[in-house]
Amino acid sequence: MTSPAERPLKVMFVGRSTSHFSYYESIVTALHARGATVDLVLDKAWSKSNLGGANGAISEYKALNSWFSFRWSVRRSDKWRNRLFELRELRSYRSYLVRRETTPFYIHRWQKYLTPRLQALVERRWFDGLLRTPMAGWFLEAFEARTPADPGIVDFIKQAAPDVMLLSPMNMRYGEDVDYAKAAKAMGLPFAISTLSWDNLSTKGVFAIKPDRLFVWNQYQRADGLEIQKVPAERVVTAGSPFFDKWFDKTGGLQSREDFCARVGLDPARKILLYLGSSKNIAKDEAWVVAKILKQLRASSDPVVSGCQILVRPHPANADVYANTKAKGLVVYPKDGALPETLEQFADMRNSFHHADVAVNINTSGMIDAVLADLPTFAVRIGKYDYTQSDSKHFKYLEGGDAIYIRGEKEIGDGIGEALNGHDPKAEHRRAFAQMFARPQGLDRSAGDVIAEAVLTMAAAYRAR
């Protein structure tokens, strides 16, 4: 019979939704490769929109890995639930009010997440002033600290008997995962947070419970973890991006330029501009931007530029704006947009980047994909989008790293023309930024493995107590 000390270390990985699996797939893989047992628990209600066949990444992973499984978490159900959830959202809203760098856009966005009662209150000047005071911050933190962990969640964790807990993202609106961190803290179980996406620390909520470890992607996120999330410096680990680990796997998936162009309807002999669509939050309708770029290209006296084709890759939550976007040499693909969740979807996306000659966008996480694919990448600076572009903290990462070209809407065509003809002075900056942003521990070391090693070190220390 195996003694408890000889059993594999067990990690309870608490996530929000099946739709997030591709963001931490490489961590799960690395934990298993290091001999750990992974108990992945996800919230069924937050996964509902992803259960009708759209949960391709997690289903595909399960089909390819017989050892893998996941189960549904239990939710907090005691008398404290409603008040706790209400005040957690207020605490995140307050963080936007008192930050050194903030914008009305993000303040107003989080205000919409408040309960109707609180939405009415924050509109009142006296309450807004009170909320900005240190006393209000102390009260919200004290209320969280003094409310007990949910007994049902504590029992759920005890039955699983993990050696460590890993959570992601832990700071999205009305997150159920917070109460797992609360229970872990009450039980003395070490817990860590893995940063989900490139802007999660700066444009989402604040951590209601401070983790024993916070895994961030890079130096920018480290600064956000310290300044915005208030996590002590000794607990923040710069690990790289698990989500972008797949870009560093060079195996398979690429088609020839001829085959790819035949599939999507492009001419392989002509240059390709890849336009990366933004979400509705960033730009509600950017079809006019695509039309303007196309007009500038066609007006060029340079046949390389005037003959350039545009491949529009819509944001999956904002694809309908291109329904009437039709022109010779312009293709919208995939029509409804797609996240790179399954192997096929990622291969499709990778081909789009690999065969493009230049990428253009307003502001989207696809900019990072373009930089990792070593594409000359342009952001079109448009005045009415300043609040989600040049005023946006995560956009400044790329701007400050000198990894992208930024041009106004009137001269974007000239900049693209130069890049299409091989003028790319930011190439070295782009490559340096790619490593710093996604793989600061080295190009040959996956972020998933960096996190797995650190998490299992925490688990081993807990078990040895």
Image (cartoon, helix red, strand yellow):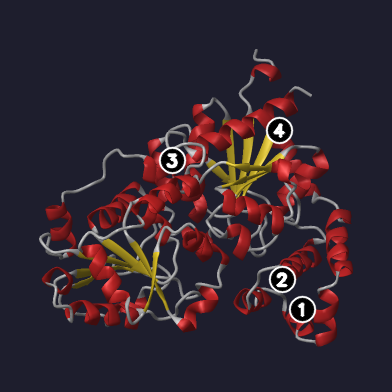
What residue would you read off at disc 2?
Answer: 93
- Residue 191: where, in percent of width, then height? 70, 41
Q: Earlier in the sequence, mark 4 or mark 2?
A: 2
Q: Earlier in the sequence, mark 4 or mark 3?
A: 3
Which corner quadrant holds the C terminus? top right
Q: Residue at horizontal 77%, vertical 49%?
A: 182
What residue would you read off at disc 1?
Answer: 118
Looking at the rendered structure, the kind of residue marked 2 is Tyr
Which corner quadrant holds the N terminus? top right
Q: Residue at horizontal 34%, vertical 47%?
A: 343
Q: Which mark is residue 62?
A: 3
Q: Is residue 321 above or below residue 239?
A: below
Is there a contact, CB below 8 Å, between mark 1 and mark 2?
Answer: yes
User: Residues under labels 3 and 1: Cα distance?
Assistant: 42 Å
What residue would you read off at disc 4?
Answer: 161
Of the two numbered discs 3 and 1 in the rendering, the one whose residue sits closer to the viewer? 1
Q: Residue at horizontal 39%, vertical 40%?
A: 63
Looking at the rendered structure, the kind of residue marked 1 is Leu
Q: Which secondary structure, mark 2?
A: helix
